[in-house]
Image (tube, helix red, strand yellow):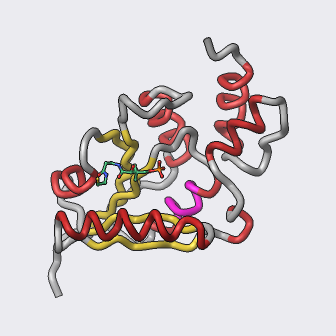
């Protein structure tokens, strides 16, 4: 038995955070001493919410979970994971359709660092259809996103999406 603290990283775009993401964060936080939510800062990937906004929204929803930290990262996920002395990447799996892509990423990350494990948590059945894109689409067209995103950030999302985007 080693006594090192166990750190996990839950990476993603989180544009924006959904109830599906929050469920994974809550469950993964129980598996590690510390869980770092890693928000991808990707200049080439167009996000509706800025990196700062995405981090702030996640912090707002996780402030009551003491062992969760939220940070952004640039570059390779494995480098971020190593820098934080984490031992595992956490990903959520919704449907079989997620599997192929996630398997490829997990294998690639394992190829880069043999010591690194990717742990998959199955999405709760009620979140199995949920995605950030669906939330954005719904909010943009004036649909009700209640129950799809945490209540404390619902208004932030509605305001952002109903404002002219350019
Ligand atoms: O929420 P997403 O968009 O599905 O998250 C994807 C994410 C951030 C996990 C993935 O794009 C990622 O790990 N990006 C960092 C770059 C990287 O390490 N790529 C894999 C090896 S090429």
User: Residue 100's x, y, as percent?
Assistant: 48, 69
Q: Is 145 left or right of 10, judged from the image as shown?
A: right
Query: What secondary structure do most residues of the magenta stretch adopt?
Result: helix
Residue sitting at 73 percent across and 49 percent down? 148
Instruction: Name the residue furthest bottom.
Output: 1
Residue sitting at 34 percent across and 58 percent down? 9
Quadrant containing the C terminus is top right
Q: Looking at the image, which is closer to me, 152 or 121?
A: 121
Magenta-span inclusion, residue 25: yes
Quadrant containing the N terminus is bottom left
Is residue 29 visible in the rendered image? The answer is no
User: Residue 84's x, y, as percent?
Assistant: 20, 53
State which quadrant residue 71 falls in: top left
Q: Is 47 left or right of 5, judged from the image as shown?
A: right
Residue sitting at 65 percent across and 28 percent down? 156
Residue sitting at 56 percent across and 28 percent down? 48
Q: Looking at the image, which is closer to me, 90 or 99?
A: 99
Where 148 sits versus 33, above or below? above
Where 148 sits versus 156, above or below? below
User: Residue 143's x, y, as percent?
Assistant: 84, 36
Q: Looking at the image, which is closer to me, 158 or 40?
A: 40
User: Residue 160's x, y, as percent?
Assistant: 65, 23
What's drawn in magenta, residue-wise? 21-26
State which quadrant residue 57 falls in: top right
């Amino acid at each position: 038995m080693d006594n090192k603290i166990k750190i996990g990283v839950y990476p993603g775009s989180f544009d924006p955070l959904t109830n599906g993401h929050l469920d994974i964060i809550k469950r993964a936080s129980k598996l590690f001493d510390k869980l770092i939510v890693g928000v991808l800062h990707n200049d080439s990937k167009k996000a509706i919410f800025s990196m700062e906004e995405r981090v702030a929204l996640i912090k707002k929803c996780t402030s009551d979970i003491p062992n969760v930290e939220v940070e952004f990262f640039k570059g390779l996920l494995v480098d971020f994971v190593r820098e934080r002395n984490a031992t595992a990447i956490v990903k959520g799996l919704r449907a079989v359709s997620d599997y192929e892509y996630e398997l490829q990423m997990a294998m690639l990350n394992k190829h880069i660092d043999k010591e690194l494990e990717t742990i998959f948590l199955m999405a709760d059945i009620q979140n199995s259809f949920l995605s950030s894109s669906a939330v954005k689409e719904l909010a943009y067209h004036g649909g009700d996103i209640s129950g799809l995103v945490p209540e404390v950030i619902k208004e932030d999302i509605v305001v952002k999406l109903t404002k002219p985007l350019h």
